[in-house]
Image (tube, rainbow, N blue to C red):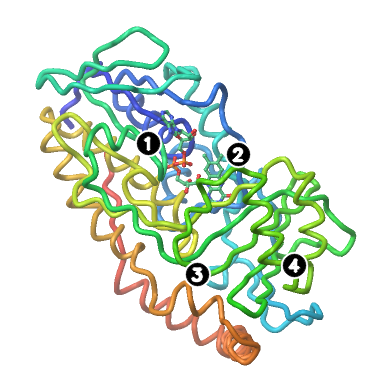
Amino acid sequence: MKKIEKKSVLVSGASIAGPTLAFWLHRFGFNVTIVERANELRTGGQNIDVRDKAQKIVQLMGLESKILAANTGELGVRFVDGKNRIKAEFPKGEAAFGTAELEILRGDLATILYDATKDNVEYIFGDQITALDDQESSVAVTFKNNPPRSFDLVVAADGIRSTTRTLMFGREPNIKYIGVYCAYLTIPKMASDNSWAYWYNAPQSRVITLRPDNEGTTRAAFSFLSPDKGYEKLDLAAQKEILKQKFADAGWQAPRILADLDTSNDVYLDGISQVKAPRWTNGRYAMVGDAAYCPTPMTGMGASLSIIGAYILAGELSRHDNCQKSFAAYEKLFRPYVEDIQNLPPGVPWMAHPKTTFGIALFNTVLGIASSKTVRKLGKRFSGKKKKTKERIKLPNYG
Ligand SMILES: Cc1cc2nc3c(=O)[nH]c(=O)nc-3n(C[C@H](O)[C@H](O)[C@H](O)COP(=O)(O)OP(=O)(O)OC[C@H]3O[C@@H](n4cnc5c(N)ncnc54)[C@H](O)[C@@H]3O)c2cc1C
């Protein structure tokens, strides 16, 4: 391995991708600075998971036991009808879309990654990059609140709405809305809430989910199919009104969640979009995580892609003196895997949001069959064989 001593890297965004990249860059001998727009680490967000090769990477980072200790305790996913009758049940680890072994609140994972890096990485909170100038031998960076500085490389890890990405690539990346809005909020836990996640379909292509957490509250989510209406740009009061109108007659636990809308302090509504960028690197610039290749919650794997991408980008930077070679290797190795993950299965998100009561009954019947013990056994056998013949990505060992 050719080691590039003390090259300086500026990373924008302190969530999952940024601190993971910083962890590995520091280990490979780089000087890393992270600039985060928020005044402190953002600890909000709901249940996310660490899957596939990302699990191996957090093992290598020595963080797997901490992530397991912060587990949400979710036992699996139950699909129910309006009378709370279970139509299908997928215990933890038994379905690609269901509960994973490493299931954790986003804020807990961000905190674990921050704690693992804060002593070796310079964190600047409450600031953001306002201008970048790639001067071939280095990048001149202007900040909103701090004096200008110069870095060898700059990486955007500031999420799906990254403004650093725009400074680097202009309008080249495509932010593709996939036709579904999701709203998330934390609500008080009721006696009827247990350690299972619940999924309920209401007519007119609406879904409500309830998930357990390890903080004594319940995580609720609404989703609904809709053309792009720009709801994410409205203020919070207007967004709450839209949710009240959309879900007033949805049944099941809708009245309870809507009653908590006005008191919940973390209501968040957004249109679900994928980021498709023809390139993730340019000169001395690179992107990682949602900023580069957000896959959407419909495919899952957002946090996992961030962790795997950050590991590969750092590893390739450690392998070559020339960052162009490193960037080319990062794109070559990781892009096929990202494209595979971003490939929405036919009918998604429509299939999971049937419009009519007949469609919902059919959806639940199909899931009921898929979740039956016999089919799950067959599925396990089949996927076991598939895994042996085709590994989706081989993680390089960067030493
Ligand atoms: C507060 C929050 C809550 C979330 N909740 C969920 C959830 O419930 N379920 C889910 O599936 N996913 C959620 N996500 C998204 C999830 O974290 C990502 O899909 C995934 O983990 C990839 O992470 P990332 O590090 O690439 O980007 P993100 O997690 O989106 O993090 C981007 C970071 O960059 C910071 N930032 C943004 N703009 C700038 C800027 N211009 N300069 C500097 N910093 C900037 C943000 O404050 C944030 O800390 C949430 C993200 C955030 C930030």
Q: Which tag, 3 or 4, sits closer to the chain's start? A: 3
Q: Could you tell me residue 2's position as x and y percent?
A: 15, 28
- Residue at mark 3: 96
Q: Secondary structure at mark 3?
A: loop
**Between marks 2 and 3, how big is the CA–CA gap?**
23 Å
Amino acid type, label 2: Gly
Residue carrying label 1? 157
Locate the N terminus by quadrant.
top left
Ligand 1: does it lie within 8 Å of the C-beta at label 2?
yes
Residue drawn at x 43%, y 50% as measured from the top left: 54
Q: Is residue 12 left or right of residue 51?
A: left
- Whether the residue under disc 1 has CB within 8 Å of ligand 1: yes
The quarter of the picture where residue 39 lies is top right
Give the mark, 2 or 3, whose residue is nearer the N terminus.
3
Label 2 and label 4: CA atoms lie apart by: 30 Å
Q: Nearer the viewer, mark 2 or mark 3?
A: 2
Residue 107: mark in rendering: 2
Q: Nearer the viewer, mark 3 or mark 1?
A: 1
Quick check: marks 3 and 1 in contact, CB under 8 Å? Answer: no
Q: Nearer the viewer, mark 3 or mark 4?
A: 4
Residue furthest to the top: 147
> What residue is shown at x 56% (from left), y 81% (from top)?
354
